Image (cartoon, rainbow, N blue to C red):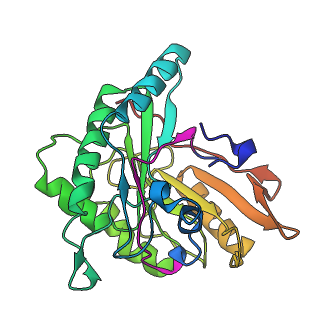
Amino acid sequence: MADQKQGGIAWTDATFNPVRGCRKLSAGCAHCYAAELSRVNPGVLGTWGANGQRVVSSDGWEARFDAWEKKAAKAGKPMRIFVNSMWDPGEGPDVDGKEGRDGPRSDYLPVLHKLVEIARRCPHLRLQMLTKRPWNLVAWWQDSDLGKWPANLWMGVSTENQEEADERIPWLMMLPAAVRFLSVEPMLGPINLAGWAIDAPGSYPLNRLAWVIAGCESGRGARPMDLAWVRSLRDQCAAAGVPFFFKQATEGGEVVSLPTLDGKVWDEFPAEVAP
């Protein structure tokens, strides 16, 4: 379980990584916490880079999700599970020294299929999946024969600045997830979502955004985040009826989780969508 008081991720209830290891793609990856963490035990946590080791869990890891499903069903409350804090499910294969954009790595395909199956058999779970490479997941889904996208498999993209938002959001909109969301972490500049925000307060149509998360960078060499950027993003979401989650900010030189912004803690979640 990820407990925020113990340094967990505030917008989820638990994390599990069936794969560990990745390669850096854009400015938001420069100080990747997962890459730093992996150096402690690369044999278990994988390594970074085009030729780095990807540690893929063997069969049997699905049982952990079945246990969470039983727990959530007994409690009568959905449980959010973040499935990739240590890898990117959209990472493409190496093609002549560059990362491919025609689908994920082949060793990720069985894992992605299992996650879809888990979502279908675990209606009390909300699987949260993030990528910086939505084009590869679009290619994967279009080429698959997996049927309808499970409503409890949430799909998000990381968008650290305007450039990445402009490129990645259109691809996110091509995925038929019931809950599509943005993780603006680390927030490296202002972002205008005017072209993508929900235009009907209180509604969550499938072709619009359902959730926005924002937060500063943490750790060694963390780059600054201007609260004016956060206020602008918060105001855009509020005007459009989009739930907004402000994960963390730097206050007095320290990173504060669930900080206040103009006197309020913004820890909103998407409206519940039945699986």
The answer to whether residue 46 shows anywhere in this view is: yes
Q: Residue furthest right?
A: 252
Q: Residue furthest bottom?
A: 97
Q: Is residue 235 above or below residue 267?
A: below
Judged left or right of residue 184, residue 104 is left
- Image quadrant in which you'd find residue 2: top right
Image location of residue 69, percent across then percent down = 44, 24
Say which of 175 and 38 sits in front.
38
Residue 221 falls in which quadrant of the image? bottom right
Residue 84 in percent (x, y) is at 45, 52
Number of marks drawn: 0
Q: Quick check: is 55 in the magenta stretch?
A: no
Q: Is residue 47 above or below residue 272?
A: below
Q: Residue 183 at x, y = what percent?
A: 52, 60
In the picture, the quarter occupied by the N terminus is top right
Give the residue at x 64% y 47%: 10
Tell me: 89 left or right of 103: right
Question: Which secondary structure dominates the residues rendered in magenta?
Answer: loop
Name the residue rendered at 54%, 59% in the picture: 41
Residue 70 located left or right of residue 108: right
For the magenta stretch, what is the residue range?
Answer: 12-27
